[in-house]
């Protein structure tokens, strides 16, 4: 009988929780014969395992419990938020180097965007942060082409083309460009860019300056800082934490 709290999960989900790859990439690792469980070749992504006790290896490297860690990275523009990019573009994990072990990103920023990116070994916390029902506020500093007037800002708040912002504040405007602070609570794919396009303006610069209470502060592109559990509990008192991360023992 398994001990309480030690639920079995699909093997592909267990691998994704290690921060090694997405669910799709994990399935590919399994199907190509690179994964073993208890020493036996595992080729079925739906195989149920208990991550806390199962001996799982990928290319001969064993998955073991790792230290809990969460960091705030200033994602540089021109990097993608994936562990491996098929097109060979630089990733945020390349930026982190050997600091990237076991970390997974809580949400994404697109290639042309920069700013706050939270990475953690606690996948339960990452899931909680990105769950739309928790309405965690993301704050962006955006620059758009042309003069975006107050009426357009209100349309972005009221909703257009199925999208809406929590708030839109104009910091500076001219006929050439407008500087905005946009707050969202869902974090849909390219949402700020799509909202601005819906009211007739193209985003030329986009930086996420805060995610919940985690602010970019003085971090420069490519710099990061560790975020302790006490800080996270203070900023996100309703958050769910697991503190049960894993990594690969090389």
Image: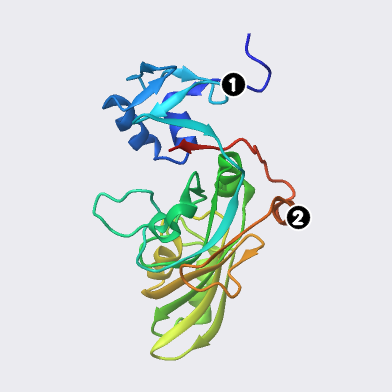
Quadrant of the image containing the N terminus: top right
Residue shown at the point (63%, 48%) measured from the top left: 134
State the count of labels: 2
Residue 188 in sight: no
The relative height of residue 184 versus residue 68 in the rendered view (above or below) is below
The relative height of residue 218 versus residue 107 in the rendered view (above or below) is below
Nearest the viewer among 172 and 75 is 75
Residue 67 falls in image quadrant: top right
Nearest the viewer among 210 and 56 is 56
Label 2 crowd bin: few (<14), some (14–19), many (20+), radius 10 Å: few
At which x and y percent is residue 120? 56, 48
Give the structural element (helix, strand or loop) at label 1: loop
Label 1 crowd bin: few (<14), some (14–19), many (20+), radius 10 Å: few
Quadrant of the image containing the C terminus: top left
Residue 180, labelled with which disc? none
Nearest the viewer among 240 and 218 is 218
Could you tell me how far apart the alpha carbons at marks 1 and 2 are, in whole angstroms?
Answer: 29 Å
Q: Mark 1 or mark 2: which comes first in sequence?
A: 1
At which x and y percent is residue 138? 57, 62
Name the side, left or right, on which 204 lies relative to 208: left
Residue 37 falls in image quadrant: top left
The relative height of residue 144 versus residue 124 in the rendered view (above or below) is below
Residue 234, labelled with which disc? 2
Give the structural element (helix, strand or loop) at label 2: helix
Residue shown at the point (39%, 69%) measured from the top left: 77
Residue 133 in sight: yes
The residue where tag 1 is placed is 7
């Amino acid at each position: 009988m398994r001990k309480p709290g030690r639920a079995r999960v699909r093997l592909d989900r267990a691998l994704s929780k290690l921060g090694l790859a997405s669910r799709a990439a994990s399935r590919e690792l399994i199907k190509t014969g690179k994964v073993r469980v208890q020493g036996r070749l595992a080729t079925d992504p739906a195989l149920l395992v208990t991550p806390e006790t199962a001996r799982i290896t990928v290319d001969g490297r064993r998955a073991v419990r790792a230290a809990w860690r969460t960091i705030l990275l200033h994602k540089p523009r021109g990097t993608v938020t994936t562990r491996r990019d098929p097109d060979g573009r630089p990733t945020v994990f390349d930026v982190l180097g050997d600091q990237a072990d076991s970390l997974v990103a809580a949400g994404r920023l697109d290639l042309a965007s920069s700013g706050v990116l939270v990475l953690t070994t606690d996948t339960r916390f990452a899931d909680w942060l990105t769950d739309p029902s928790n309405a965690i506020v993301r704050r962006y500093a955006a620059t758009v082409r042309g003069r975006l007037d107050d009426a357009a800002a209100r349309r972005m708040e009221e909703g257009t083309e199925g999208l809406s912002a929590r708030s839109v504040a104009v910091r500076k405007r001219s006929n050439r460009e407008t500087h905005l602070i946009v707050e969202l609570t869902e974090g849909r794919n390219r949402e700020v860019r799509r909202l601005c396009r819906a009211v007739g303006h193209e985003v030329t610069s986009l930086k996420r300056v805060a995610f919940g209470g985690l602010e970019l502060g003085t971090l420069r592109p490519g710099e990061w800082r560790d975020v302790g559990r006490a800080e996270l509990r203070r900023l996100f008192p309703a958050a769910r934490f697991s503190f049960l991360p894993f990594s690969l023992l090389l």
